[in-house]
Image: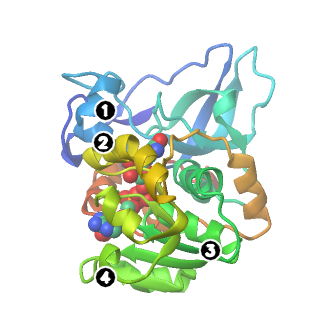
């Protein structure tokens, strides 16, 4: 089978398309023919081998050589202990921890997968798992979002932000999005009530206050964020700068104690809310935002676009087009 592999840490140029052996599922796994896979920020970290990701995937060189966690495809073979799925089922899910998505086939445990609704394309399904789970778990589980609130999303035009605004709108919430100039039009068209261009304006210095802040960049001090949180407001970080995340971890409890403002960190529970996403999709309430149309041999180009931050929503790679089989 074809797979995009990397044998050393580096930029998109270290990704190579190779012919490798097709994997075989263990008794509790299924073999999936992958139709689509999306790029996540975590793939970018694993590609470059920052400190945390070297702890996970090897200090000197990557142990797991195929990136890609969010996949959608069709089950080709089931292991003998698999009970949830059968051959021919269309599935999707987040395989982070094992990765292996930038390939024509991969194996996965059944707990990591959900059935794909028939009206959802494989590209839409591959866009959902990590970004949508972070948005749901940030806003609902950590933020206890409720009607009438004012929400600000920092880093609004990427994967998490474009799901988060759609979830927020289910609660009749006023939403402000912060991103760069080129993404503001898209944000407005998606239903953001207000947009802020971070190249022109610092939202932590204006006079607005928010009940909820969902942050995918975490590039300011916790004191800056609490300044623009209303009383009992909640700041939720899903990721970003490591020093700032450590500040959130250690200062958060103290800030809550003295200011009645709350700092919370999302620890991703992979695939937890996929069935909820299926319900929202089937009810027409969620529409994944997909940037571009890439093939497997164009993965390096897709990563370059991701690295520049120029993508809108999720970058999805079509591995095999089911209509051309
Ligand atoms: N908590 C967990 O367990 C967990 C697990 C996996 C991933 N994560 C985290 O989840 C996040 C993934 O978010 P995502 O998929 O939405 O990323 P993304 O698709 O890269 O989107 C990030 C957006 O932020 C914008 N941006 C860049 N600099 C900014 C700034 N200074 N101010 C405001 N916006 C800015 C980017 O646009 P421009 O660059 O064009 O400006 C882009 O539109 C990452 O932080 C990742 O580390 C967390």
Dot 4 and dot 3 residues touching (CB under 8 Å): no
* Percent of width and height locating residue 120: 70, 59
In this rendered view, identify the residue nearer to me: 226 or 61: 226
* Percent of width and height locating residue 217: 35, 58
Dot 2 and dot 1 residues touching (CB under 8 Å): yes
Q: Is mark 3 within 8 Å of ligand 1?
A: no
In this rendered view, identify the residue nearer to me: 261 or 9: 261
Residue 49 shown left or right of residue 262 in the figure:
left
Any part of residue 289 in sight: no
Q: Which residue is mark 2?
A: 45
Q: In the rendered structure, which disc, 3 or 2, sits on the residue that comes first in sequence?
A: 2
Q: Is mark 2 within 8 Å of ligand 1?
A: yes
Secondary structure of the residue carrying tag 2 is helix
Dot 4 and dot 1 residues touching (CB under 8 Å): no
- Report how far apart the C-alphas of labels 4 and 3 lie in the structure: 26 Å
The crowding category of the residue bearing disc 4, from other C-alpha atoms within 10 Å (few below 14, some 14 to 19, many at least 20), is few
Residue 301 shown left or right of residue 117 in the figure:
left
- Report how far apart the C-alphas of labels 2 and 4 lie in the structure: 25 Å
Instruction: For marks 3 and 1, give the one nearer the viewer.
Output: 3
- Report how far apart the C-alphas of labels 2 and 1 lie in the structure: 6 Å
The residue shown at (57%, 18%) is 24
Q: Residue furthest front?
A: 258
Q: Which mark is residue 53?
A: 1
């Amino acid at each position: 089978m074809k797979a995009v592999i990397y044998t050393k840490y580096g930029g998109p140029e270290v990704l190579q398309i190779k012919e490798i052996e097709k994997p075989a599922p263990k008794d509790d796994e299924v073999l999936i023919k992958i139709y689509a896979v999306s790029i996540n920020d975590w793939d970018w970290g694993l590609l470059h081998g920052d400190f945390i990701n070297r702890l996970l995937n090897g200090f000197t060189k990557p142990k797991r050589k195929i990136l890609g966690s969010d996949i959608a495809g069709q089950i080709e073979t089931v292991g003998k202990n698999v009970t949830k799925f059968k051959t021919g089922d269309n599935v999707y899910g987040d395989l982070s921890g094992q990765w292996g998505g930038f390939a024509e086939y991969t194996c996965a445990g059944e707990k990591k997968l959900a059935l794909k609704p028939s009206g959802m394309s494989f590209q839409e399904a591959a866009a959902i798992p990590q970004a949508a789970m972070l948005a749901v778990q940030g806003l609902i589980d950590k933020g206890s979002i409720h009607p009438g609130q004012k929400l600000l999303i920092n880093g609004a035009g990427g994967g998490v932000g474009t799901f988060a605004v759609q979830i927020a709108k289910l609660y009749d919430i006023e939403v402000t999005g912060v991103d760069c100039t080129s993404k503001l039009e898209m944000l407005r068209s998606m239903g953001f009530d207000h947009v802020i261009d971070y190249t022109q304006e610092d939202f932590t210095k204006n006079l607005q206050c928010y009940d909820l802040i969902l942050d995918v960049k975490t590039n300011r001090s916790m004191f800056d964020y609490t300044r623009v949180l209303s009383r009992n407001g909640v700041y939720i970080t899903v990721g970003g700068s490591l020093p700032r995340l450590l500040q959130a971890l250690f200062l958060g409890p103290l800030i809550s104690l003295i200011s009645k403002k709350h700092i919370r960190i999302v620890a991703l529970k992979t695939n937890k809310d996929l069935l909820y996403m299926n319900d929202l999709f089937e009810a027409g309430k969620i529409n994944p935002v997909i940037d571009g149309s890439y093939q497997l041999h164009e993965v390096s180009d897709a990563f370059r676009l991701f690295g520049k931050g120029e993508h809108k929503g999720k970058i999805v790679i079509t591995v095999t087009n089911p209509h051309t089989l």
